[in-house]
Image (cartoon, rainbow, N blue to C red):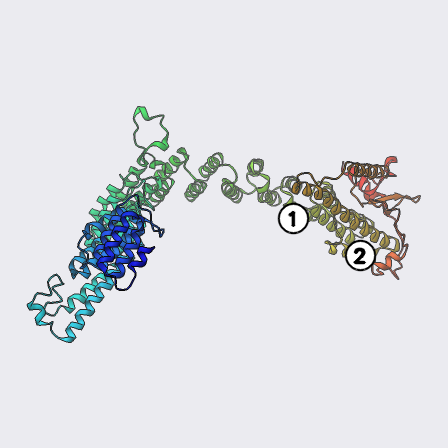
């Protein structure tokens, strides 16, 4: 510290301070950076460069300022580049080029430093060579942008200097006499007018930017097909450059490493010759292209198809057919490769199974060949098991156009044996449609066999359209009773979400053909199935509407009661409004009151169900959140278990063990009819009986209505209209279930 204070004193000569610092560094070599800063302040750039070079080369040196060797080396490059005339102790060119090879992340910056070094020394042409070399070697867009911008700025500054020189007159004669222009750009000292040359040089540099940038991208990855195609498009006005670029592209791109489709380069190359009228060279390019080891069979198939398109455009139809025959011919294999996995073969050995190639071949044979040759191609595709469902349909259509209907049906059969659902859906649809439209009722039994075969194979989620087509066949050409049987089978097989519409269609057709009795059987069978609650509710509602139209009020009321267990009053307000209007028109005070009680009971049932679900989920969630600390006590769980057992026993004593909570129970009376009542799922001893005022709470809907009271007929819930001894004390839901059984 005392030495630094002495050096910074005023009046101390620079040479004295340098000698003192040098001696101090012998004892403290780690303070070399302080000496460098001192030399910078005094303008001793030659010694600054020398000291920095020693620091960079010293592997044991540790910077007190926290600088890395890389940062100090870049600092050295900037110093020698900005003070070229004062630094003579270093080979600047070799030093910077060595850094370019070593520090690849700063290539653009180092190239500009080297060019700046020559510019400051007046060697402009040498600087241009450095810029061009940098643009030709960098591999990143960032480095390219740094060098190109510096290069452009340099050319603009030279052009500006020349314009100022031209405006001010000739150069100083004294400078020419004493040779002061030596080492500078000779064009600046030329007495001729080179302003246009410099302007043209700048414009040429700007026009080369897309090409130079394309070269940078290709140096990053020479197998980038997209960049090669962009580069070719840059030389659109120069066919010779395009040919050279095409040649360079197809020889540089490795198909196994390519980004993009390498076959596109070959196809574009061949089309380039075709556009310029050189068809022979185009065929030569295609011939070489089909021998390239592509990574995908589809690439080679595309090249063959493009070659065929070329022959078609040249009206060479025979050549196109022979070309496709050549492409689809299976190559011979050696005996040792008979059992080899086909995936291990080159694409040339697997292209004969390409669907794209065979499809193109089929189109050619249909258009240019004969029927026999087209059939042979289609049969060959089926034998190779590469045919798609669309190929099967095309083959069948071809045969039908030539009046070979039985042959087309055989093709359909082969397609059905090849594919399973859902792939053969279109084949079945076309087969059935063509057969029914052609023969109608002439071959009804054969058509039925086809439909039965189809229905047996089709999965349930896709069976509805085929069942409807089967029904249409029976309705138009068969028997109505068979149509009803098909409807019944369809209702059993189709998914639950499609059964509602199908049942409605079934009931509509049954009403037209067999009357109300058949419709009732359909609805009763549907309601008795294990369908979703929403579907059952809708079916009951529609069944009730039918009974209302027929005047069967009691039957309609029973259906409304059955459907009520699936209708939450909080969500299904339309159902309860419909039942309310029904009771207003056809019921009496007692039936209306029963409807209101059922509504409250169902509402309580849904509320209790939601509460029970919440109480079940809550302990589990608590147990997951805290590893068992929130588990209920043993006594509490025991009490809950006992309460649940007691409730179940009470339900069993009430005859409701097989019913849901809050459902309607029927009680018999002496008159032989059935009166409807309500049994609550959970009896509350503290419940207050509000009596007849309950009607008023629901809007006084039943006030002032004076209609005759009726009892539900027992025949509604009995199959034969008689109630057995065991059914007299049973509820409505029990009799519904027993009727179904």
- Percent from the top left, x then y, of residue 615? 74, 44
Q: Of the residues under marks 2 and 1, which one precedes in the sequence? A: 1
Locate the C terminus by quadrant: top right
- Residue ranking furthest to the left: 177
Q: Quadrant of residue 580?
A: bottom right
Please report contact status of discs 2 and 1: CB closer than 8 Å, yes or no.
Answer: no
Kindly identify the residue that appears in the image at 25 percent across and 44 percent down: 252
Q: Is residue 319 left or right of residue 697?
A: left
- Percent from the top left, x then y, of residue 200? 18, 65
Q: Residues within 10 Å of mark 1 (few under 14, many from 20)?
A: few
C-alpha span from label 2 to label 1: 26 Å
- Percent from the top left, x then y, of residue 383? 40, 33
Q: Which mark is residue 371?
A: none
In depth, the one of 105 and 200 nearer the eye is: 105
Q: Which mark is residue 501?
A: 1
Q: Describe the element under mark 1 as helix, strand or loop.
A: helix
Q: Is residue 131 visible?
A: no
- Residue ranking furthest to the bottom: 168
Q: Is residue 618 visible?
A: yes
- Residue ranking furthest to the top: 335
- Percent from the top left, x then y, of residue 16? 23, 57
- Residue ranking furthest to the right: 670
Kindly identify the residue that appears in the image at 28 percent across and 53 percent down: 74
Residue that label 2 marks: 580
In depth, the one of 200 and 564 nearer the eye is: 200
Locate the N terminus by quadrant: bottom left
In depth, the one of 605 and 153 nearer the eye is: 153
Q: Quadrant of residue 733?
A: top right
In depth, the one of 107 and 204 nearer the eye is: 107
Q: Residues within 10 Å of mark 2 (few under 14, many from 20)?
A: some
């Amino acid at each position: 510290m005392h030495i630094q204070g002495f050096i910074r004193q005023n009046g101390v000569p620079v040479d004295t301070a340098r000698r003192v610092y040098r001696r101090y560094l012998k004892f403290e070599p780690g303070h070399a950076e302080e000496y460098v800063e001192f030399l910078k302040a005094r303008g001793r750039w030659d010694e600054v460069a020398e000291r920095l070079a020693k620091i960079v080369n010293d592997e044991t040196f540790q910077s007190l300022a926290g600088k890395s060797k890389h940062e100090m080396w870049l600092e050295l490059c900037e110093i020698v580049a900005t003070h070229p005339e004062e630094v003579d102790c270093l080979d600047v060119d070799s030093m910077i080029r060595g850094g370019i090879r070593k520090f690849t992340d700063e290539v653009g910056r180092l190239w500009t430093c080297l060019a700046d070094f020559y510019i400051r020394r007046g060697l402009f042409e040498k600087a241009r060579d450095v810029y061009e070399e940098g643009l030709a070697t960098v591999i990143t867009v960032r480095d390219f942008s740094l060098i190109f911008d510096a290069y452009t700025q340099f050319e603009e500054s030279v052009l500006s200097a020349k314009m100022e020189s031209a405006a001010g007159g000739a150069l100083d004669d004294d400078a020419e006499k004493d040779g002061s222009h030596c080492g500078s750009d000779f064009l600046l000292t030329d007495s001729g007018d080179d302003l246009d040359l410099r302007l043209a040089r700048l414009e040429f540099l700007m026009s080369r930017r897309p090409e130079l940038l394309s070269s940078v991208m290709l140096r990053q990855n020479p197998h980038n097909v997209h960049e090669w195609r962009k580069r070719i498009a840059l030389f659109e006005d120069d066919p010779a450059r395009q040919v050279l670029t095409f040649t360079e592209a197809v020889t540089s791109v490795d198909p196994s490493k390519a980004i993009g489709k390498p076959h596109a380069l070959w196809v574009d190359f061949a089309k380039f010759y075709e556009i310029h009228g050189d068809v022979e060279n185009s065929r030569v390019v295609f011939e070489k292209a089909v021998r390239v080891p592509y990574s995908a069979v589809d690439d080679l198939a595309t090249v063959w198809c493009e070659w065929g398109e070329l022959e078609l455009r040249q009206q060479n139809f025979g050549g196109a057919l022979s070309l496709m025959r050549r492409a689809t011919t299976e190559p011979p294999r050696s005996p040792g490769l008979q059992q080899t996995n086909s995936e291990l073969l080159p694409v040339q050995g697997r292209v004969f199974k390409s669907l794209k190639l065979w499809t193109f071949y089929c189109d050619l044979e249909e258009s240019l060949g004969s029927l026999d040759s087209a059939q042979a191609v289609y049969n060959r595709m089926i034998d190779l098991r590469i045919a798609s469902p669309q190929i099967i349909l095309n083959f069948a259509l071809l045969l039908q156009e030539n009046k070979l209907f039985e042959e087309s049906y055989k093709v359909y059969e082969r397609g059905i044996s090849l594919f399973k659902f859902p792939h053969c859906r279109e084949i079945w649809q076309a087969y059935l449609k063509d057969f029914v439209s052609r023969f109608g009722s002439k071959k009804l039994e054969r058509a039925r066999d086809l439909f039965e075969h189809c229905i047996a194979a089709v999965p349930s989620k896709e069976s509805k359209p085929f069942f409807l087509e089967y029904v249409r066949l029976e309705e138009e050409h068969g028997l109505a009773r068979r149509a009803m049987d098909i409807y019944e089978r369809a209702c059993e097989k189709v998914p639950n979400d499609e059964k509602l519409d199908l049942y409605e269609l079934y009931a509509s057709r049954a009403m037209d053909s067999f009357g109300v009795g058949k419709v009732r059987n359909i609805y009763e069978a549907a309601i008795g199935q294990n369908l979703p609650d929403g579907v059952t509710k809708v079916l009951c509602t529609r069944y009730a509407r039918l009974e209302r139209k027929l005047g069967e009020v009691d039957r309609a009321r029973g259906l409304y009661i059955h459907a009520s267990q699936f209708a939450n009053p909080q969500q299904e307000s339309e159902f309860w409004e419909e039942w309310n209007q029904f009771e207003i028109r056809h019921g009496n005070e007692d039936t209306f009151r029963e409807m209101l009680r059922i509504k409250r009971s169902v509402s309580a049932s849904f509320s209790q169900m939601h509460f029970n679900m919440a109480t079940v989920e809550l302990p589990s969630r608590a147990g997951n959140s805290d590893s068992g600390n929130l588990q209920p006590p043993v006594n509490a769980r025991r009490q809950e278990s006992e309460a649940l057992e007691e409730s179940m026993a009470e339900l069993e004593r009430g005859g409701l063990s097989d019913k849901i909570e809050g459902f309607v129970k029927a009680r018999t009376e002496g008159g032989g009819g059935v009166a409807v009542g309500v049994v609550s799922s959970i009896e509350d001893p503290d419940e207050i009986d509000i009596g007849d005022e309950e009607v008023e709470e629901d809007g006084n809907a039943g006030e002032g209505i004076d209609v005759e009271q009726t009892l539900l007929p027992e025949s509604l819930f009995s199959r034969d209209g008689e109630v057995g001894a065991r059914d007299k004390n049973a509820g409505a839901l029990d009799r519904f279930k027993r009727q179904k059984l």
